[in-house]
Amino acid sequence: MTLPAPRHGTGAADPAAPGRELAEPGFWQLPPERRLAAFARLRALDSPVFVPEGPGHWALVRHAQVQEASRLPKVFASAPGVTTPEPARWVRALFGDSMVNLDGADHAQLRKIVQRAFTPRLLAAAEEDIHAVAARIVDDVLTGQPDEFVSAVASRLPLEVICNMMGIPEHYRAEIADRVDHASENIGVERGLAARLRMPGRGLRALARMQRMVARIGRERRKNPTDDLISALVCANVDGQALGTRQLGAFFSLLMVAGVETTRNAITHGLTLLTDHPDQRDLLLSDFEKYADGAVDEMIRHSTPIIQFRRTVAAEHTLGGHLFRPGDKVVLYYASANRDEAVFPDPDAFDITRSPNPHLGFGGGGPHFCLGAHLARVEMKALFRQLLTRPVGLRAVGLPDFAGSNFDNRVRSLKFAFERP
Ligand code: HEM
């Protein structure tokens, strides 16, 4: 379907118009409190504002708006892409379409195949594995005494868990870790011209090599299936369908960004939050099993690892007092929805007993709701159980090094310290 070019709102011309700041790369480098204060001002307005970034988009900043748009996929479509800028046509042709960018029957069919592979049996086996991996990471921390949390702890757990689930042989893993970093380091981050020209090439090369590697494993598993996720995906046989080689590659790349980046950022923000809020940390430690589920969800609400996803309007619809027309771009700001004072009393407080906590960190419901939400929660709970009960006084030191992305709340590095037990 060819959609008409989007109309520009009044904000495009007026440099002081509300929402214009979201188009400035410098805005995403500001300390979190200043960005969140800007979103609070936008939530107070009567209708969504226009952000003149690239082709421009309308910003949905209230909880109710983000939820409504997520649950109306025929109006707010995911095709041609949910990230900004949207993937080029040739990139999609070469690498295959990721399920996040598909709608309707195409999306449902892919999700059905993939969901079938996330069977209770596979997830139960993964849970056992998660506890073992978390324990091993903390063993290594106690022995090696590293001082950088993202690489030594937060990245390791989600990467190892997904590689174990998928059945990626050990000798590919260091390379995959490196490629995941290269494939995602540029998303949503403003850089100088030289870096902008160099980075996408490096990211695409990393993606291409990762896909070739997974395609090779997929071909082997089709011939000799084992009980891992790649075998389940290439032999899934839902309505006579399994994943083809390109679809498998696209799904693997999605899992690496959607499942690894997000969880590692949530874990890193979690440590910072527990360090900055010693009362909440003491409460969690007073009865870990009682408070851990609430703590994990509050970490996700407060930090919102995925800041935003985009939709393209496919049918006329009024939302938040604004009439959207086909072709309009709309961005769902989960980071703002999760601080909406209409839903969360004292929204900036970090409160592990918050109940209910209907955060939109995993999406606003609807067909694209995060496939890995359960897995992410289990990973975070298992890791914090180990981190808080084995080393003594584990804490973040100094401030996190934020990537300044407008897409995900990425932390490049964070120093940490602890005493041995
Ligand atoms: C704290 C960690 C995580 C966060 C914050 C997160 C967040 C999200 C969000 C916001 C979406 C989009 C939802 C929507 O459009 O309605 C999403 C989709 C998705 N997530 Fe997650 N995610 C996390 C962990 C994971 C993990 C561990 C996996 C896989 C193992 C995963 C796999 C996916 C997939 C495959 C989708 C696309 C689903 C679809 O298009 O149907 N995520 N996630």
Image: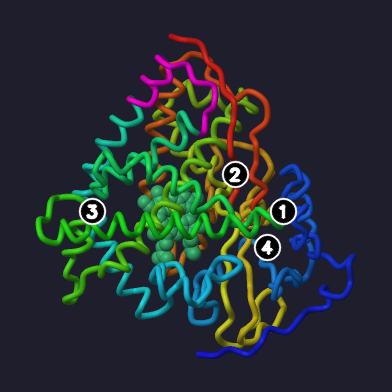
Q: Give how far across and how far down residue 80 sits, in percent.
A: 51, 77
Q: Which one is closest to the eye, mark 1 or mark 2?
A: 1
Callout 1 secondary element = loop
Q: Residues within 10 Å of mark 3 (few under 14, many from 20)?
A: many
Q: Is mark 2 within 8 Å of ligand 1?
A: no
SS at circle 4: loop
Mark seen at residue 98: none
421 w.r.t. 13: above or below = above
Question: Nearer the viewer's eye, disc 3 or disc 1?
Answer: 1
Amino acid, disc 1: Gly
Amino acid at pointer 2: Ser
Q: CA distance from mark 1 to mark 2?
A: 27 Å
Q: Which residues are magenta?
A: 136-150
Q: Nearer the viewer, mark 4 or mark 3?
A: 3
| Residue 191 at x, y percent in the picture | 69, 53
Q: CA distance from mark 4 to mark 3?
A: 37 Å
Residue for point 49% across, 48% down: 262
Q: What residue is disc 1 on?
A: 192
Left or right of 155: which side holds 353?
right
Classify residue 257 as left or right of residue 113: right
The residue singled out by tag 2 in the image is 303
| Separation of marks 3 and 1 at Cα, in angstroms | 40 Å
Could you tell which of marks 1 and 2 lies nearer the N-terminus? 1
Please report contact status of discs 3 and 2: CB closer than 8 Å, yes or no: no
> Which residue in the protein does label 3 denote?
229
Q: Which of the two labelled residues, at mark 3 and mark 2, occupies the earlier sequence position?
A: 3
Dominant secondary structure, magenta: helix
Q: Amino acid at mark 3?
A: Leu
Which residue was labeled with disc 4? 61
